[in-house]
Image (cartoon, grey):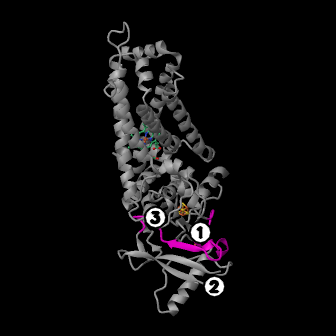
Amino acid sequence: MKLKLHVWRQKGPNAPGKLETYEANHVSPDQSFLEMLDEVNEVLVKEGKDPIAFDHDCREGICGMCSQIINGMAHGGQDRTTVCQLHMRSFKDGDEIFIEPWKAKAFPIIKDLAVDRGNYDRIIQAGGYTSCHTGGVADGNALLIGKEIADYSMDAAECIGCGACAASCPNSSAMLFASNKVAQLAVLPQGQVEAKRRVVAMLDEATACGFGNCTNHYECQAACPKGINVKFIAKLNREYLKALLP
Amino acid sequence: MQLTQSSVGRKIIMAVTGAMLFAFVCVHLLGNSSLFFGSAALNAYAQKLHSLGPVVWIFRLVMLGLFTVHIIFGIQLTLENKAATPDKNVQIKRLKTGFAAETMVVSGLVLLAFVVYHLLHFTVRVTNPEIYVPIEGGHGMVDVFVMVTHGFQQILPVLLYVIGMGFLFLHVSHGFQSLFQTVGLSNDRTLPVMGNFSKLVGLVLLVGYVSIPLLIIFGIVR
Ligand code: HEM
Ligand code: SF4
Ligand code: FES
């Protein structure tokens, strides 16, 4: 396949950026999107040019490092798929593809397609600790947790922290991310001790980081490579209301 | 204070004030539909409201308060959301959201303009002096049935009402389901249906409200 790529190039955080056009002339449908970019980069390096910077790590859809807006959609818009798991067979010969970084005030661009997602870590940090007994290993069945609750918590914990939720949100809101952290802990006995403090602190931190407010567009769920459900945002709102009560 | 400063707190205020405005819009439509039972029914309804005296003024002040709070937080949250996305991507393709959700502040401000016009038209009664005629034996009260049926025989007011209600449809078609999510009253069973249900609620309000001016200008109600 032959493709025409329009890639966002930006030298540094404060440098101006713009789309530049590249040809990818030997693309195999079996390649992943990142492998296709690797080949483009090899050509650029051979020509003595600066390769396109992009984030990646596991390349198997579990680490949350890869992060690109492809044709206007976070991770390329394929259901429950990260960029690294997007394959070139979903494109066709002659396609023009726009490749851009996450764009939100709270995700500053480091270079080209790589952005700083430290603010998601700050939200997690603001959540703080959970109270657990230390010492000898607890008896496996000492603390029983029903399957429905365990499943609910695990569904929330599926988040890989990629940032697509805020990147795809028209308000750059981090609510889907914050909500799954809050929900995941709020239903478990270990997380309930600090639940009130946690939800308020995480929300305040998200605002302080520069993320926007949720207006229920639900773009996040559509973009999320793990299909995290917006029901967790409703849960976050309930937890917040509980926190307001004395 | 947490509630008036935090992200979710202010959203909850939006939802609660929005719900009350929505409740008013529904009750107002029910009251207005007494028009379909003729002149006596509408005038009796109007006189009943007026006889409440100070209660009417308390009610008006509460509505003004709700509106003000809803508008102030609505504009504030929208400005913050714009500021959170200073540079947009060149290509943006939305997968789920729609026109109504993306233009809430616009439809809201058009509604505000509409409400101002509506109050001048039928409450303060300054826009069309010819339609405000005293009712027989009504101690100087205006004949509301005449006011409405004559008021809607002109094309401009009818047009303004239809446009205003079009924006009410847009605002409610996103806002109704949004308020349930915001106050935490939704889950994975309600979420898939609430989007369409919310549009239906907006449509019922639209049809209900525009039926009055349209049936009058087309001479079906007179
Ligand atoms: C008849 C009058 C109105 C009604 C019935 C109404 C109703 C609603 C409802 C039910 C919501 C959803 C609440 C939530 O989930 O947080 C909402 C949100 C909103 N309203 Fe209104 N509203 C009215 C007037 C206005 C006005 C005059 C403005 C002007 C600024 C406005 C601006 C907004 C904004 C910006 C939102 C937030 C968008 C969102 O969260 O999706 N509204 N409104
Ligand atoms: S909620 Fe989904 S989109 Fe958001 S960071 Fe987690 S995995 Fe990514
Ligand atoms: S590189 Fe790890 S999820 Fe894509």
- Residue under pointer 3: A120
Ranked by sequence position, the earlier of labels 2 and 3 is: 2
Residue B42 spot, x, y in % from top left: 46, 17
Q: Residue at x 52, y 33 (%)?
A: B205
Residue A65 spot, x, y in % from top left: 53, 72
Q: Residue at x 40, y 50 (%)?
A: B7
- Residue under pointer 1: A82
Instruction: Indicate yes or no: mark 1 CB to ligand 3 under 8 Å.
Output: yes
Residue in front for this viewpoint, B199 or A21: A21
Labels 1 and 2 touching (C-beta < 8 A): no
Quarter of the render that holds ligand 2: bottom right
In the image, which is nearer the foreground, mark 2 or mark 3? 2
Q: Secondary structure at mark 2?
A: loop
Q: Secondary structure at mark 3?
A: helix
Q: CA distance from mark 2 to mark 3?
A: 37 Å
Q: Are marks 3 and 1 on the same chain?
A: yes
Residue B8 forms part of the magenta stretch: no
Q: Numbered disc 3: what chain?
A: A
- Residue under pointer 2: A26
Labels 2 and 3 touching (C-beta < 8 A): no
Q: Which mark is residue B140?
A: none
Instruction: Indicate yes or no: mark 3 CB to ligand 2 under 8 Å.
Output: yes
Which segment is the magenta one? A78-107
